[in-house]
Image (cartoon, helix red, strand yellow):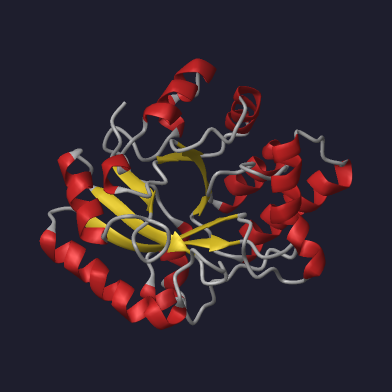
Amino acid sequence: MKLTADYHTHTIFSDGKNTALENALAAEQAGLETIAVTEHGYSHHFRGLKRRETEAWLAMIEDARAGSKIEVLRGMESNIRGISGLCDFTEKDFENFDVYLAGIHIVIRYENFRDRKLGWGGWMRRSLHLKPSERFVRDTTRAYLNAIEKNPLDIITHLNFQCFADVKEVAKCCRDYGTYLEISSKKQHFTDEELAEAAATGVRFVINSDAHSADRVGDAALAAEQIARVGIPLGQIDNIEGRKPTFRFAEFKKHL
């Protein structure tokens, strides 16, 4: 299985160790055709891209495009800030970006106080091996569904990493709206049963490295092991073997 593109990488503008050019050169060396540089969103307290840094970040992307032979996309791993599906990425930001990812993270500015449970509550339950209540799972699932329905999301990142949602329901929503589910090669966030259940809905997948250093760009090993173990059809993964996804965000921007 050969990765065509890696749509989830970080740089020194969030919590990565390398520049976009260093990531792009590593991707080129690994035989990829495309990478997306996807910093954590604006509402992340410590690890997110700052709005005041956006121009410098865009300049770094241009340096990577000029200094490498592959396609380098401008992206963001936005934060889902509440059950309403609010993300920290507005239409005013859209012109500066090519790819729109989103996921649940911990140390962010939540929409309101009760929404803190999406990140902190999930992290605590995962850490202490506590079973979540039905209401907790229902609320987290609703946050994902609302985010997918209300925003032109290309990819949901590391679903159920440090949180709890109904994977089947999120996968069905992704399928219906044309949003991809990420299979992360940084951390196993699905159980084998959850991944099989998601695949059975017909949702489309992408494999991403979630690289925070250049030496991990294009790394698909962990994801490949689970995909083979579970028996996911490779035809259901749209960034391998020369294939590239058709993303919602690019189509949405055509109509702005």
* Quadrant location of the N terminus in the rendered image: top left
- Give me the residue at 53% from left, 51% from top: 178
Residue 166 appears in the picture as rendered:
no
Residue 159 at what x, y percent from top left? 60, 44
Q: Work out whether 175 lies above or below 21.
A: above
- Give me the residue at 43% from left, 55% from top: 247
In depth, the one of 170 and 83 nearer the eye is: 83
- Left or right, 238 with reference to 67: right
Residue 108 at what x, y percent from top left? 62, 65
Q: Work out whether 14 lies above or below 241.
A: below
- Left or right, 140 with reference to 8: right
- Give me the residue at 44% from left, 30% from top: 223
Q: Quadrant of residue 85?
A: bottom right
Residue 8 appears in the picture as rendered:
yes
Count of numbered circles in the view = 0
Residue 191 at what x, y percent from top left? 62, 27
In depth, the one of 91 and 203 nearer the eye is: 91
Q: Work out whether 25 lies above or below 52.
A: above
- Give me the residue at 39% from left, 39% from top: 238
Residue 256 at what x, y percent from top left? 47, 78
